[in-house]
Amino acid sequence: MNDSNGEVLRTDLTSWTIGPYHGSLPAPMKLCLSLDGEIITDCEVETGFLHRGLEKACELHSWKATVAYADHLDPECAVFGELVLCLAVEQLAEIEVPLRAQCIRVVLAELARISGHLSFMVRMAKAVGSETIIHYLLRDREKILDLFELLTGARFSLNFLRYGGVSADVTDGFIERVLEVCELIRIRMKEYNDLFTFNFGFLKRTSEVAAISKNLVSHCGMTGPNARASGVSIDVRKVFPYSGYDRIDFEIPLGHGEGGVVGDVHDRFLIRLREITQSMEILKQLLDVVPAGDYMSTKCDQTSVIPPGESYVRIESSRGLLGCHVVSDGRNSPSRVQFRTPTVANLLAIPQIVRGIRIEDLPVVLASLDLGIAEADR
Amino acid sequence: MISAENSWIVAWGEAFGLPEGVPHWIYSAAALIFIFCFVIVPCGGLMSYFERKLSADLQARVGPNRAGPAGILQPIADLLKLLQKEARSEWNWKESLWLSVHTMALFSTLAVLPLGSMALLVNTEMSVFLPFWSALVLALGTMLLGLSQNSVPGWFGGIRVAAQTLAGSFPALISLLCTGVRSGSFRWSALAESQGFSPWDWTVVANPFQLVAFCVFVVSGLVLLAIAPLDGGLSMSDIHGGVSSHLYGMRLSLFRFGRFYGFFFWSVITVVLFLGAWDLPSQLVIPLRMGGAGRLLAFIELAWLLIKTFALMLLIIWIAKVNSRSRVDQITDFAWKVLSPFSLAALVGASLCAGWRAF
């Protein structure tokens, strides 16, 4: 290896830069790897390739239009961006949300969580090269997207939530169809377990790989399923309940190290699988008794100006703690909208956990972190 | 290298109306071209169609359904599409060289491929081992092909393929010996004669050790030739298919066809060694042979052999589709630490069984 700058290069290590676009990356990002043979000795992560200026765009548009931008925070699970922004603005403007609207919001959020976790499993399956399950998972996620379409008219960018409620009431048969889909996925769980959880090949690829310790979780500020897989019991739905989660009875699954080590790739996978079950439990409880009433706060006028002040709200998205800080100076548009996204913390953990693993495990580890680069770069 | 007692080409030459006195090497060359064009290539097309249809059925998809009835012409459409690819501007002579070496090593095995009692070009005590050396040369070619590409995926892919081949060849070789122990010879004809049409006469069920040897032979073949699901060397998710990551168009189709051929020839050999070869019921064979319908018999034998081969290949594809791809270090570990001891045990057991029978 020659170097024109006269800098001494270590010849025992190979350097390999992958990205911004590469098969092992879940989204546009760049990894500068140092390799000793096939073992990764060092890794630098570079992101920002998907920066769209969402927060700035929110400032340039009216309050009403910001919801559509929050939609694009994480295109895969659009509801969470909308929900956190609406909750922040409602807190700031002291808008009461009717119970029925809260219920519809939580239904959407939990469906989005299931859909997000199914997509996570698709990426895991791709990373370990297990082709068949990808199609099974996508087939089932399609059912959830159908539900979104039935309720909101859109499959991904819903733009359905409004300050003070939601933009439309549930249509006839929606509730029954949600329950049908829940039942379908409950049956399919066995299939997923057979093809993933109890599959010898999958266990070989995932157990004892890239474990995240509790220390690393707190050091990087990781939240969500990744933190819970390492045994850190943190869930915003329990700690700071919102939208009526306090009225619902559900459990927070934690990683126990079934694959060998607590917080390894297998634990991170299992957590998601169990959260899907919990989300279906939540949906069943919610849809048992849907409160009657308005789907939109009668006192809230969408054209009204939000009073000056600021608020910060956090929710549990499918990837972890999603926060939103909204500042209003009384004008027609927000003065500042800022999001705290869970993926940023997960990105911080990458260099720590990939050290010592093989290149073949890199896609698996990246997929297991469930990186939403769209929300990290925003 | 045409054995005297089995100069089937001469019989074929007569059947096709070739004049007598033509040198044997012309017959051999003609036979090789014939086998390649009329057996291997159609099998490749058919198999890729079956594979896609089968995986589509497994994966709740439709699969190819546009080109021809039920999409049967899809392999041809794919080939034509790949051939139309525009050439890349930079030309890497090393890559071209190693691709041709790799391809030549691969198709040299055609000469030893057993395709029926009357289609044995090389039928000596060494014939079983010849595909083996070709497989090793093939791995070397693949490795150097990878190393000649100026890319990290190529390098890693090449090295991984070499590591896998080294690990897989030992158990494969040992389990191969088990069949020779039973039949008493490594001639293709002797191996086939020691078995019969009925599954109960196949080597695989002769005794438990042969069953172990069969399993080891199939699995170590997957390791040796890097066939899914043990194809870590050509992993898609991290190194973009390794050696094939930089190939395109014509070269890619050549490489892919070579991969198919490797899989195919290993399956054919497995069927010949363990699964009753081309053996047909004697009620069928004797009248045909006596009645002078040797060519018809050869075709029936070939068809029966290919049906069994395809069944074995589809079974492996089925397993590969549902399981995840294994890591290379796990594959080599598995080959050295699990397959090798089992193959040795199978060899000892098979030898004891053969000795017991001899007394």
Image (cartoon, helix red, strand yellow):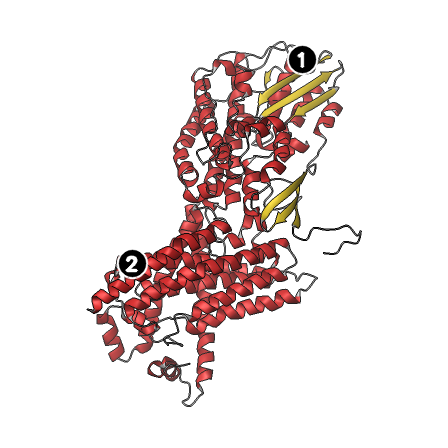
Please state the chain letter of the residue tagged with numbered disc 2 in the rendered image: B
Near mark 1 (Cα within 10 A), the count class, few <14, some 14-19 or many ≥20, is many
Residue A241 position by quadrant:
top right
Q: Dots 1 and 2: beta carbons under 8 Å?
A: no
Indicate whether A240 appears above or below A138: above
Q: Is B230 positioned to the left or the right of A36 in the image?
A: left
Q: Amino acid at mark 1?
A: Leu
SS state under label 2: helix
> Residue A51: x percent and y percent?
70, 34
Residues behind callouts 1 and 2 on a single chain: no
Q: Amino acid at mark 2?
A: Phe
Measuring 59% from the left and 60% from the top, which residue is drawn there? B146
Q: Nearer the viewer, residue A214 or B139?
A: A214
The quarter of the picture where the N terminus of chain A appears is bottom right
Measuring 60% from the left and 21% from the top, which residue is drawn there? A83
Measuring 42% from the left and 85% from the top, which residue is drawn there? B18
> Residue A314: x percent and y percent?
61, 19
The quarter of the picture where the C terminus of chain A appears is top right
**Which residue is denoted by mark 1 in the rendering?**
A92
Q: Is A339 positioned to the left or the right of B293 in the image?
A: right
Residue B230 visible in the picture: no
> Residue B145: x percent and y percent?
59, 63
